[in-house]
Image: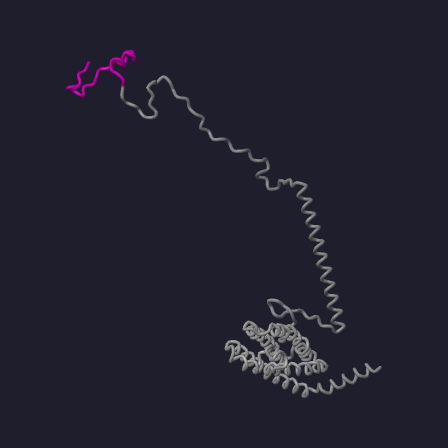
């Protein structure tokens, strides 16, 4: 047995390669060399090799590279396509029929002298037909725009009147004046459009003397109402239902803010009155200068004769 401290560590042990391996292991002892992952202590046994081949790709169809090969489409898909095609053809025929019907009605209305007016104002929620630039003669467009301004001014006056009367109602006045201000707005704005603005619009567009007559009649009433509202005499509920000068003077000493609201309403009604008087003057000058007065008298005479017979 070798000593613990070998005097010559580089002295190799003589090994007989032809001797028995078991005896050689006994004489030389167990080797400490691991050998790595591919080293085996038993050279006679070979580890089994695992199957590392990749799975084969699926076979390609026979006509994969044939551009002229036919593709089979299910019969159900063909039936659905034919059904949708028939539905589209039916809808197209219906639209064509409706288009022809609308065109026929437009032609009939044009032959009868009826003008179909498409609602286009205001743009965000069309309520009326209004197209001054395309329907009113150029020399009358400025006057028509000013008349339209008086219509919008009337809407503003009545809206502010509701605000002022609401402030007075909050300060303890009767609810009746607030209800009257609502009635003024509901009746005043549509009434102004139907009774005097639309007749003037049609008078300028068609050069109709009868429409001029309707405009003069109701526009005088409009001017009278604006003057009455600007003064607001104590006739109906002491005048508090209209934002005029008399209730403004009465309220400013009691409730300053309410009085200021009424003074603003008085200013709006005054401005509306002045602008309306100017429109009336200009329309009347055009009416007299264009000879529409004689035409209106003739139309009135013919209407009276028809009524008599």
- Locate residue 81, reporting x and y percent: 67, 47
Asked if residue 9 is among those painted magenta in the image, a careful observer would answer yes
Q: Residue furthest right?
A: 309
Q: Is residue 54 left or right of residue 130?
A: left
Is 119 drawn above or below residue 2 in the view shown? below
- Locate residue 73, reporting x and y percent: 65, 41
Residue drawn 59% across the image and 39% down it: 66
- Locate residue 64, reporting x and y percent: 57, 38
- Locate residue 213, reporting x and y percent: 71, 83
Is 140 drawn above or below residue 111 in the view shown? below
Give the image quarter of residue 42. top left
**Range of residues picked out in magenta:** 1-30
- Of residues 17 and 216, the one nearer the viewer is 216
Q: Is residue 214 left or right of residue 41?
A: right
Residue drawn 73% across the image and 84% down it: 296
**Residue 94 appears in the picture as rendered:** yes
The mark total stands at: 0
């Amino acid at each position: 047995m070798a000593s613990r401290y070998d005097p010559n560590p580089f002295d190799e042990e003589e090994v007989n390669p032809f001797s028995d391996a078991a005896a050689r292991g006994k004489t030389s002892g167990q080797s400490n060399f691991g050998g790595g992952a591919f080293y085996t202590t038993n050279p006679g046994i070979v580890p089994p090799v695992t199957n590392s081949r990749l799975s084969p790709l699926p076979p390609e169809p026979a006509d994969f590279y044939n551009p002229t090969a036919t593709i089979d489409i299910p019969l159900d898909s063909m039936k659905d396509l034919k059904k949708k095609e028939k539905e589209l053809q039916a809808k197209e025929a219906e639209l064509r029929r409706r288009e022809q019907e609308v065109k026929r009605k437009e032609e009939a209305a044009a032959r009868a002298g009826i003008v179909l007016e498409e609602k286009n104002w205001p743009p965000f929620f069309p309520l009326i037909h209004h197209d001054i630039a395309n329907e009113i003669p150029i020399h009358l467009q400025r006057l028509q725009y000013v008349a339209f301004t008086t219509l919008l001014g009337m809407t503003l006056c009545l809206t502010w009147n509701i605000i002022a009367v609401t402030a007075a109602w909050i300060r303890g006045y009767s609810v009746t004046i607030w209800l009257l201000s609502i009635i003024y707005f509901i009746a005043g704005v549509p009434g102004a459009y139907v009774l005097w603005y639309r007749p003037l619009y049609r008078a300028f567009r068609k050069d109709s003397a009868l429409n001029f007559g309707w405009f003069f009649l109701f526009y005088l009433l409009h001017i009278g109402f604006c003057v009455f509202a600007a003064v607001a005499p104590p006739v109906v509920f002491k005048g508090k239902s209209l934002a005029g000068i008399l209730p403004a003077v009465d309220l400013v000493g009691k409730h300053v803010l309410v009085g200021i609201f009424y003074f603003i309403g008085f200013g709006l009604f005054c401005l509306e009155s002045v602008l309306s008087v100017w429109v009336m003057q200009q329309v009347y000058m055009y009416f007299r200068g264009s000879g529409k007065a004689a035409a209106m008298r003739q139309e009135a005479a013919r209407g009276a004769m028809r009524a008599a017979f």
